[in-house]
Image: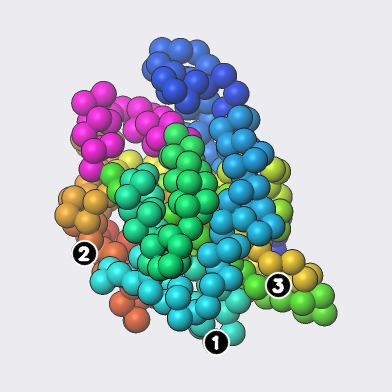
Protein backbone atom coordinates (compact mmCIF):
# COMPACT_ATOMS: atom_id res chain seq x y z
CA UNK A 1 0.00 0.00 0.00
CA UNK A 2 1.05 3.59 -0.54
CA UNK A 3 2.86 5.34 2.30
CA UNK A 4 0.94 6.89 5.15
CA UNK A 5 2.77 10.15 5.77
CA UNK A 6 -0.20 12.43 5.13
CA UNK A 7 -2.36 14.19 7.66
CA UNK A 8 -5.56 16.16 7.36
CA UNK A 9 -6.51 19.33 9.27
CA UNK A 10 -8.67 19.42 12.38
CA UNK A 11 -10.99 22.42 12.58
CA UNK A 12 -12.73 23.53 15.76
CA UNK A 13 -16.19 25.04 15.24
CA UNK A 14 -16.41 26.37 18.81
CA UNK A 15 -18.18 29.73 18.74
CA UNK A 16 -20.16 28.99 15.58
CA UNK A 17 -23.80 29.06 16.62
CA UNK A 18 -25.44 26.20 14.73
CA UNK A 19 -28.89 27.71 15.30
CA UNK A 20 -28.17 30.92 13.43
CA UNK A 21 -25.19 29.67 11.46
CA UNK A 22 -23.45 32.90 12.33
CA UNK A 23 -23.30 35.78 9.92
CA UNK A 24 -20.92 36.35 7.09
CA UNK A 25 -19.34 39.39 8.71
CA UNK A 26 -18.86 37.70 12.04
CA UNK A 27 -15.07 37.37 12.60
CA UNK A 28 -15.29 33.87 14.07
CA UNK A 29 -17.41 32.64 11.17
CA UNK A 30 -14.99 34.15 8.65
CA UNK A 31 -11.97 32.57 10.37
CA UNK A 32 -13.52 29.10 10.43
CA UNK A 33 -14.74 29.54 6.85
CA UNK A 34 -11.17 30.34 5.81
CA UNK A 35 -9.89 27.18 7.48
CA UNK A 36 -12.67 25.09 5.90
CA UNK A 37 -11.92 26.47 2.44
CA UNK A 38 -8.19 25.88 2.86
CA UNK A 39 -8.76 22.29 3.99
CA UNK A 40 -11.28 21.42 1.27
CA UNK A 41 -9.24 23.07 -1.50
CA UNK A 42 -6.02 21.41 -0.38
CA UNK A 43 -7.30 17.98 0.71
CA UNK A 44 -11.07 17.76 0.18
CA UNK A 45 -11.31 16.47 3.72
CA UNK A 46 -10.98 17.59 7.34
CA UNK A 47 -11.92 16.60 10.85
CA UNK A 48 -14.56 18.87 12.38
CA UNK A 49 -14.97 19.34 16.10
CA UNK A 50 -18.32 20.75 17.14
CA UNK A 51 -18.68 20.18 20.87
CA UNK A 52 -22.22 19.77 22.06
CA UNK A 53 -23.70 19.07 18.63
CA UNK A 54 -24.50 15.51 19.63
CA UNK A 55 -24.92 14.54 23.28
CA UNK A 56 -22.94 11.52 24.50
CA UNK A 57 -26.30 9.81 25.16
CA UNK A 58 -27.47 10.24 21.57
CA UNK A 59 -24.10 9.18 20.25
CA UNK A 60 -24.23 6.00 22.38
CA UNK A 61 -27.83 5.32 21.32
CA UNK A 62 -26.79 5.40 17.66
CA UNK A 63 -23.21 4.10 17.42
CA UNK A 64 -22.55 2.60 20.88
CA UNK A 65 -22.60 -1.11 21.67
CA UNK A 66 -26.13 -2.42 21.09
CA UNK A 67 -27.19 0.94 19.62
CA UNK A 68 -29.38 1.68 16.62
CA UNK A 69 -26.75 1.01 13.95
CA UNK A 70 -25.65 -2.28 15.47
CA UNK A 71 -29.24 -3.45 15.95
CA UNK A 72 -29.99 -2.69 12.30
CA UNK A 73 -26.92 -4.44 10.93
CA UNK A 74 -27.61 -7.45 13.19
CA UNK A 75 -30.86 -8.21 11.37
CA UNK A 76 -30.81 -11.22 9.05
CA UNK A 77 -29.69 -10.50 5.48
CA UNK A 78 -33.21 -11.40 4.29
CA UNK A 79 -34.55 -8.41 6.24
CA UNK A 80 -31.76 -5.98 5.30
CA UNK A 81 -32.17 -6.90 1.63
CA UNK A 82 -35.65 -5.31 1.76
CA UNK A 83 -33.85 -1.95 1.71
CA UNK A 84 -33.93 -1.58 -2.06
CA UNK A 85 -33.99 1.30 -4.51
CA UNK A 86 -34.17 1.61 -8.26
CA UNK A 87 -31.28 4.07 -7.94
CA UNK A 88 -27.76 2.71 -7.47
CA UNK A 89 -26.16 2.80 -4.00
CA UNK A 90 -29.36 3.85 -2.24
CA UNK A 91 -30.18 0.54 -0.65
CA UNK A 92 -28.63 -2.54 0.95
CA UNK A 93 -25.08 -3.39 -0.16
CA UNK A 94 -23.41 -6.47 1.26
CA UNK A 95 -22.63 -10.16 0.95
CA UNK A 96 -19.77 -9.25 -1.41
CA UNK A 97 -17.16 -12.04 -1.42
CA UNK A 98 -13.93 -10.96 0.30
CA UNK A 99 -15.32 -7.63 1.54
CA UNK A 100 -16.27 -7.27 5.24
CA UNK A 101 -18.70 -4.49 4.24
CA UNK A 102 -22.43 -4.39 4.84
CA UNK A 103 -24.47 -1.24 4.56
CA UNK A 104 -27.99 0.20 4.35
CA UNK A 105 -29.26 3.60 3.33
CA UNK A 106 -32.07 5.75 4.68
CA UNK A 107 -33.11 8.12 1.92
CA UNK A 108 -34.40 11.48 3.21
CA UNK A 109 -33.46 10.87 6.88
CA UNK A 110 -34.52 14.40 7.90
CA UNK A 111 -38.11 13.34 7.32
CA UNK A 112 -39.62 11.53 10.34
CA UNK A 113 -41.98 9.71 7.97
CA UNK A 114 -39.12 8.43 5.81
CA UNK A 115 -37.23 7.11 8.85
CA UNK A 116 -40.40 5.46 10.15
CA UNK A 117 -41.10 3.86 6.75
CA UNK A 118 -37.54 2.50 6.74
CA UNK A 119 -37.94 1.05 10.25
CA UNK A 120 -41.33 -0.46 9.36
CA UNK A 121 -39.66 -2.23 6.47
CA UNK A 122 -36.86 -3.57 8.66
CA UNK A 123 -39.00 -4.45 11.69
CA UNK A 124 -42.44 -5.12 10.17
CA UNK A 125 -43.93 -6.36 13.47
CA UNK A 126 -42.78 -3.62 15.83
CA UNK A 127 -41.52 -0.68 13.74
CA UNK A 128 -38.77 -0.02 16.33
CA UNK A 129 -39.63 3.36 17.82
CA UNK A 130 -36.28 3.70 19.62
CA UNK A 131 -34.43 3.29 16.32
CA UNK A 132 -36.61 5.91 14.64
CA UNK A 133 -36.24 8.45 17.39
CA UNK A 134 -32.50 8.22 17.78
CA UNK A 135 -31.71 7.94 14.05
CA UNK A 136 -33.88 10.89 13.11
CA UNK A 137 -32.51 13.08 15.93
CA UNK A 138 -29.00 12.12 14.95
CA UNK A 139 -29.52 12.94 11.27
CA UNK A 140 -30.95 16.33 12.23
CA UNK A 141 -27.95 17.19 14.37
CA UNK A 142 -25.38 16.08 11.79
CA UNK A 143 -27.30 18.05 9.14
CA UNK A 144 -26.66 21.22 11.14
CA UNK A 145 -22.92 20.80 10.69
CA UNK A 146 -23.36 19.81 7.05
CA UNK A 147 -25.34 22.99 6.37
CA UNK A 148 -22.75 25.18 8.08
CA UNK A 149 -19.91 23.68 6.02
CA UNK A 150 -21.89 23.83 2.76
CA UNK A 151 -22.73 27.47 3.34
CA UNK A 152 -19.13 28.31 4.21
CA UNK A 153 -17.87 26.79 0.96
CA UNK A 154 -20.48 28.51 -1.19
CA UNK A 155 -19.71 31.84 0.47
CA UNK A 156 -16.02 31.05 0.07
CA UNK A 157 -16.37 30.91 -3.71
CA UNK A 158 -18.49 34.04 -3.76
CA UNK A 159 -22.06 32.69 -4.05
CA UNK A 160 -24.85 35.15 -3.32
CA UNK A 161 -27.30 34.69 -0.45
CA UNK A 162 -30.04 33.96 -3.03
CA UNK A 163 -27.96 31.23 -4.64
CA UNK A 164 -27.25 29.65 -1.25
CA UNK A 165 -30.95 29.62 -0.42
CA UNK A 166 -31.92 28.08 -3.78
CA UNK A 167 -29.11 25.54 -3.57
CA UNK A 168 -30.36 24.43 -0.13
CA UNK A 169 -33.82 23.75 -1.58
CA UNK A 170 -32.27 21.64 -4.35
CA UNK A 171 -30.30 19.45 -1.91
CA UNK A 172 -31.17 15.84 -0.99
CA UNK A 173 -29.90 13.78 1.95
CA UNK A 174 -29.09 10.14 2.53
CA UNK A 175 -27.88 8.43 5.69
CA UNK A 176 -25.68 5.38 5.14
CA UNK A 177 -25.20 2.99 8.06
CA UNK A 178 -22.38 0.52 7.68
CA UNK A 179 -20.76 -2.41 9.46
CA UNK A 180 -17.18 -3.52 8.84
CA UNK A 181 -16.70 -6.99 10.27
CA UNK A 182 -13.63 -7.41 12.48
CA UNK A 183 -10.83 -9.08 10.54
CA UNK A 184 -9.68 -11.10 13.57
CA UNK A 185 -6.62 -10.59 15.72
CA UNK A 186 -4.34 -12.70 13.52
CA UNK A 187 -5.03 -10.78 10.32
CA UNK A 188 -3.11 -7.74 9.12
CA UNK A 189 -4.71 -4.93 7.15
CA UNK A 190 -7.94 -5.88 5.39
CA UNK A 191 -9.67 -3.63 2.86
CA UNK A 192 -13.17 -2.80 4.08
CA UNK A 193 -14.13 -0.51 1.21
CA UNK A 194 -11.93 0.06 -1.86
CA UNK A 195 -10.65 3.55 -2.72
CA UNK A 196 -13.28 5.77 -4.32
CA UNK A 197 -14.48 9.36 -4.56
CA UNK A 198 -17.99 10.32 -3.45
CA UNK A 199 -20.44 11.72 -5.99
CA UNK A 200 -22.05 13.96 -3.33
CA UNK A 201 -21.59 17.56 -2.23
CA UNK A 202 -20.47 16.58 1.25
CA UNK A 203 -20.31 13.51 3.44
CA UNK A 204 -20.23 13.84 7.23
CA UNK A 205 -18.97 10.69 8.90
CA UNK A 206 -19.12 9.49 12.48
CA UNK A 207 -18.12 6.08 13.75
CA UNK A 208 -17.89 3.92 16.86
CA UNK A 209 -14.47 3.86 18.48
CA UNK A 210 -12.77 1.93 15.65
CA UNK A 211 -10.82 3.96 13.08
CA UNK A 212 -10.45 2.73 9.53
CA UNK A 213 -10.87 5.54 7.03
CA UNK A 214 -7.83 6.50 4.98
CA UNK A 215 -7.74 9.62 2.80
CA UNK A 216 -5.35 10.63 0.07
CA UNK A 217 -4.01 14.08 1.03
CA UNK A 218 -2.75 17.08 -0.91
CA UNK A 219 -4.94 16.54 -3.98
CA UNK A 220 -3.45 13.08 -4.35
CA UNK A 221 0.18 14.20 -3.90
CA UNK A 222 0.49 13.96 -0.14
CA UNK A 223 0.26 10.27 0.67
CA UNK A 224 -2.50 8.55 2.61
CA UNK A 225 -3.62 9.78 6.01
CA UNK A 226 -5.37 7.63 8.57
CA UNK A 227 -7.15 10.10 10.84
CA UNK A 228 -7.60 9.15 14.47
CA UNK A 229 -11.04 10.48 15.31
CA UNK A 230 -11.84 11.65 18.81
CA UNK A 231 -15.26 11.12 20.34
CA UNK A 232 -17.48 13.96 19.20
CA UNK A 233 -15.54 14.71 16.05
CA UNK A 234 -16.69 14.28 12.47
CA UNK A 235 -14.86 13.54 9.26
CA UNK A 236 -16.00 15.68 6.34
CA UNK A 237 -15.39 14.77 2.70
CA UNK A 238 -16.15 16.84 -0.37
CA UNK A 239 -17.45 14.90 -3.36
CA UNK A 240 -17.53 15.27 -7.13
CA UNK A 241 -20.48 17.66 -7.33
CA UNK A 242 -18.90 20.14 -4.94
CA UNK A 243 -15.84 20.08 -7.16
CA UNK A 244 -18.07 21.01 -10.11
CA UNK A 245 -19.91 23.80 -8.25
CA UNK A 246 -16.64 25.39 -7.20
CA UNK A 247 -15.12 24.86 -10.67
CA UNK A 248 -12.38 22.61 -9.33
CA UNK A 249 -11.32 24.63 -6.30
CA UNK A 250 -12.71 22.17 -3.79
CA UNK A 251 -11.10 18.75 -4.17
CA UNK A 252 -12.84 15.35 -4.15
CA UNK A 253 -10.35 13.05 -2.43
CA UNK A 254 -9.90 9.35 -2.89
CA UNK A 255 -10.66 7.53 0.35
CA UNK A 256 -11.02 3.94 1.48
CA UNK A 257 -11.61 1.90 4.60
CA UNK A 258 -8.90 -0.44 5.86
CA UNK A 259 -9.47 -2.53 8.97
CA UNK A 260 -6.19 -2.77 10.83
CA UNK A 261 -6.75 -6.16 12.46
CA UNK A 262 -8.24 -6.87 15.85
CA UNK A 263 -11.53 -8.28 16.92
CA UNK A 264 -13.79 -5.24 17.12
CA UNK A 265 -16.44 -4.53 14.53
CA UNK A 266 -16.47 -1.03 13.07
CA UNK A 267 -19.73 0.88 12.60
CA UNK A 268 -20.06 4.13 10.71
CA UNK A 269 -22.85 6.55 9.95
CA UNK A 270 -22.53 8.99 7.06
CA UNK A 271 -24.85 11.80 6.12
CA UNK A 272 -24.49 12.52 2.40
CA UNK A 273 -25.79 15.73 0.84
CA UNK A 274 -26.17 15.86 -2.92
CA UNK A 275 -28.22 17.59 -5.59
CA UNK A 276 -31.70 16.17 -6.18
CA UNK A 277 -31.62 13.80 -9.16
CA UNK A 278 -33.18 16.18 -11.70
CA UNK A 279 -30.97 19.14 -10.75
CA UNK A 280 -28.44 20.32 -13.30
CA UNK A 281 -24.99 20.54 -11.73
CA UNK A 282 -22.80 23.37 -12.99
CA UNK A 283 -20.17 25.75 -11.63
CA UNK A 284 -21.52 28.83 -9.91
CA UNK A 285 -21.06 31.99 -11.99
CA UNK A 286 -18.65 33.56 -9.49
CA UNK A 287 -16.25 30.60 -9.81
CA UNK A 288 -15.95 30.94 -13.60
CA UNK A 289 -14.04 33.68 -15.40
CA UNK A 290 -11.57 34.35 -18.16
CA UNK A 291 -8.76 32.96 -15.98
CA UNK A 292 -10.89 30.06 -14.82
CA UNK A 293 -12.99 28.67 -17.67
CA UNK A 294 -15.60 26.09 -16.64
CA UNK A 295 -13.75 22.78 -16.20
CA UNK A 296 -16.91 20.63 -16.44
CA UNK A 297 -19.95 20.64 -18.65
CA UNK A 298 -23.35 20.94 -16.93
CA UNK A 299 -25.10 17.61 -16.25
CA UNK A 300 -28.06 16.15 -14.40
CA UNK A 301 -27.00 14.65 -11.09
CA UNK A 302 -29.18 11.54 -11.47
CA UNK A 303 -27.57 10.74 -14.83
CA UNK A 304 -24.12 11.08 -13.36
CA UNK A 305 -24.90 8.64 -10.54
CA UNK A 306 -26.17 6.06 -13.03
CA UNK A 307 -22.94 6.50 -15.03
CA UNK A 308 -20.76 6.03 -11.92
CA UNK A 309 -22.34 2.72 -11.00
CA UNK A 310 -22.06 1.11 -14.41
CA UNK A 311 -20.05 -2.08 -13.85
CA UNK A 312 -17.24 -0.88 -16.12
CA UNK A 313 -16.98 2.43 -14.23
CA UNK A 314 -17.06 1.22 -10.61
CA UNK A 315 -13.26 0.92 -10.33
CA UNK A 316 -12.53 4.06 -12.37
CA UNK A 317 -10.58 6.60 -10.31
CA UNK A 318 -11.64 9.72 -12.24
CA UNK A 319 -15.31 9.28 -13.02
CA UNK A 320 -16.08 13.00 -12.99
CA UNK A 321 -13.39 13.75 -15.56
CA UNK A 322 -14.55 10.80 -17.68
CA UNK A 323 -18.16 12.04 -17.59
CA UNK A 324 -17.98 15.81 -17.73
CA UNK A 325 -14.48 17.27 -18.20
CA UNK A 326 -14.39 19.99 -20.83
CA UNK A 327 -11.56 19.31 -23.22
CA UNK A 328 -9.19 22.21 -23.73
CA UNK A 329 -7.55 21.46 -27.06
CA UNK A 330 -4.50 23.09 -28.54
O1 LIG B 1 -17.87 3.94 6.29
C1 LIG B 1 -16.89 4.64 6.13
O2 LIG B 1 -16.09 4.87 7.03
C2 LIG B 1 -16.60 5.27 4.79
C3 LIG B 1 -17.59 4.85 3.75
C4 LIG B 1 -17.53 5.66 2.49
O3 LIG B 1 -16.55 6.28 2.16
C5 LIG B 1 -18.73 5.71 1.63
O4 LIG B 1 -19.72 5.02 1.95
O5 LIG B 1 -18.72 6.46 0.63
FE1 LIG C 1 -16.98 7.50 0.47
Q: Is residue 286 above or below residue 327?
A: above
| Label whose residue precedes the other's in the sequence (1 or 3) | 1
Q: Nearer the viewer, residue 128 or 82?
A: 128
* Residue at the farthest right position: 186
Q: Which residue is mark 3?
A: 182
Q: Which residue is mark 1?
A: 97
Image: magenta residue range:
145-170
**Residue that appears at 34% across and 81% down:** 312
Neighbor class of circle 2 (other Cα within 10 Å; few <14, some 14-19, many 20+) is some
* Residue at the farthest front position: 125
Q: Is residue 239 above or below residue 285?
A: below
Instruction: Please provide percent x and percent y for residue 79.
Output: 45, 75
Mark yes or no: residue 215 visible. Answer: no
Query: Which quadrant holds residue 297?
Result: bottom left
**Residue 281 placement, left or right of 265:** left
Q: Which residue is mark 2?
A: 303
Instruction: Please provide percent x and percent y for residue 258.
Output: 65, 68
Q: Nearer the viewer, residue 53 or 129?
A: 129
Query: Which quadrant holds residue 14?
Result: top right
Q: Is residue 256 above or below residue 299?
A: below
* SS under mark 3: loop
**Residue that appears at 62% across and 35% down:** 55
Q: Is mark 3 within 8 Å of ligand 1?
A: no
| Label whose residue precedes the other's in the sequence (2 or 3) | 3
* SS under mark 2: helix
Q: Is mark 2 within 8 Å of ligand 1?
A: no
Q: Is residue 29 above or below residue 156?
A: above
* Residue at the farthest bottom position: 97
Amino acid sequence: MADMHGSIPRIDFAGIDPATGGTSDDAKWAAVRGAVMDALCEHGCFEAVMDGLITPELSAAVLGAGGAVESLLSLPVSAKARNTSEKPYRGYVGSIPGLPYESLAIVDPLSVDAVRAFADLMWPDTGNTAFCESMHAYAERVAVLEAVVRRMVLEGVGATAEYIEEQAKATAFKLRLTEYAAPGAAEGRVVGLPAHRDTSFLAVLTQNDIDGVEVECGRGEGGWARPVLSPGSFLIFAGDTFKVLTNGRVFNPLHRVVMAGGDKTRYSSILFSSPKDDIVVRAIDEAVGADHPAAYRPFEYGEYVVFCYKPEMIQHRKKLEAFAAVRIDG
